[in-house]
Amino acid sequence: MDLFEKCWTYAKPKQAQALGIYPYFVPFTSQAAPQVTIGGRTVLMFGSINYLGLTEDARLKGAAIDAIQKYGTGCTGSRLLNGTLDLHEELEHRIARFMGKESALVFTTGFQTNLGIISALVGREDVVVLDRACHASIVDGSRLAFGKMVKFAHNDMEDLERILAEHAGRHGILVVVDGVFSMEGDLANLPEIVRLKQQYGARLMVDDAHGIGVMGPSGRGTAEHFGVADAVDLVVGTFSKSFASTGGFVAGNEQVIYYIKHTARAFLFSASTPPASAASALAALDIMETEPERFARLWENTTKWKTHLDRMGFNTGHSATPIVPIVVGNDFRLAVFWRKLFDAGVFANAAVAPAVEPGHALLRTSCMATHEDGHLDQGLEILQQVGRQLSFIE
Ligand SMILES: Cc1ncc(COP(=O)(O)O)c(C=O)c1O
C-alpha cells in the first residue's frame, strides 16, 4: 500500500475550493490592522488576534529595525549553544517581573513552549490532566510526554475532581488549562481549579496566550483577573497575539524554569527567537506597562461588539473576552456565511473540527484596541445583513 494514498484521496478542502467558499490561507497584502487589503480590496478585519493593535505601532517597528541593524536577521542556532542574545535574557527578566514570577524562559513559538514544558515535566509515573478544549499544542505536548494523558469535560469541575481523586497520591499531576479558550473566548474556572489542585496536591499550568495583555486590571492575564495569580505554578504566554511579535514564554518558580531550560527538547533543539521579534516583544511590554488606556479601549470595543451581536440574536456562546464567536453548527453553513461576509467586506475566522467539537462550527470574531467606532458600526451592519439573509437571525 502506498503511504501517499491518503494524500491522493484527500478531497474535503477541494470541494469547498470548487464552490468558492474555502476560508483558509487567504493572502493579505497589508499589515494586520482594522482594515486589511486582500486581492486589491480593502476589508474590515475582525479575525486578527492583534488585541492591542500593536502590529502597526511605530515603536515596535523601530525596535525591530534597530535590532536587525545591531544583531542581524537571525540567531542561526539554539539558545543552548550559540543563539542566546542579551535581548533574550532581558526579555526573560522583564516577563518574569511583569508576571510576578521568579523566573521566565523564552521559546521560539507559543506552540513549542507547550510542547517543551509538558513533555519535559510529565514523566513515566506522572499524569497530565487537561481540559478537553485546550489548544492543540497542549494536546500534542501531552501526547509527547511519557506519562498518561487524561482529559476532563470542558470546564466541568466535577469531572476534574473525579480524575484528580483517582490519581492523587500515586502520581505527580500536572493540570493544564487555557486561561481564555481560544475559539469560544470563554474563561477557565481558575478559582475552582486552584482549589482542587491544592486539595489534591497537583501542579497547575495555565496557557494564557489570549489572556495576557487582555485580562486583569493590568493585563497580566486570567489569573490576575480572578485574583489567583500566586496559586498558578506555571503561566504560559505567546508574543504572537497582544505582543504583536512572535515567540512564547513560561514563567514560574526559578528551579522549575531552570529544569525546563535544560530538558525541554522543543527549546533545546530549535533556533532561538529572531532579534527583531525579541526586540518588538520588549517594546510591546513597555507599552503594556505604561499605556493602560489601550486595555480600556479594547474592552470598550469588545463590550459594544458583543452587546450588539447578542441583541441582533446571534449565538455568541459563553464568550467573556475580546474573542466573540458566532456559533453556526454546520461546517457548510459556516463556509457560506464566511464567504458572504467576505464579499460584503468583513474578514473573520472560520473554525471547524478539530479546532472546535464536531458539529459546533463557529465564526470567530475578535476586537482590537485600534478598531474605531466606524469600523465596528460598519462591521455590525454587514453581519446583521448577512445573518438575516442566511436566516441566522430575524
Ligand atoms: C491558547 C494558545 N496556546 C498556544 C498558541 C500557540 O502560540 P504561537 O502562535 O506563539 O505558536 C496559541 C495560538 O494559536 C493559542 O491560541
Image: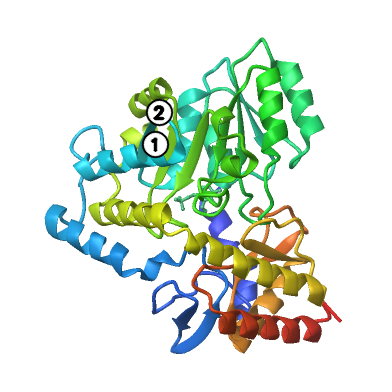
Residue 18 in the image: state x and y as whole percent.
Answer: 61, 80
Compared with residue 23, is residue 341 higher up or lower down, i.e. above or below? below
Q: Which label belongs to residue 96?
A: 1
Left or right of 238? Residue 274 is left
Residue 90 in the image: state x and y as whole percent.
Answer: 27, 41
Q: Are marks 1 and 2 in contact (CB under 8 Å)?
A: yes
Seen at 24% across and 60% down, the residue is 63
Q: Which label belongs to residue 356?
A: none
Note whether residue 19 is visible: no
The way the protein has been coloured in the rendering is: rainbow
Distance from the alpha carbon under mark 1 to that under mark 2: 6 Å
Left or right of 53? Residue 61 is left
Q: What amino acid is found at the position of numbered circle 2 in the picture?
A: Glu
Compared with residue 317, is residue 120 higher up or lower down, i.e. above or below? above
Note whether residue 175 is visible: yes
Please give the residue where the numbered disc 2 appears in the rendered image.
102
Seen at 43% across and 42% down, the residue is 112
Give whichever of 72, 62 is nearer the camera: 62
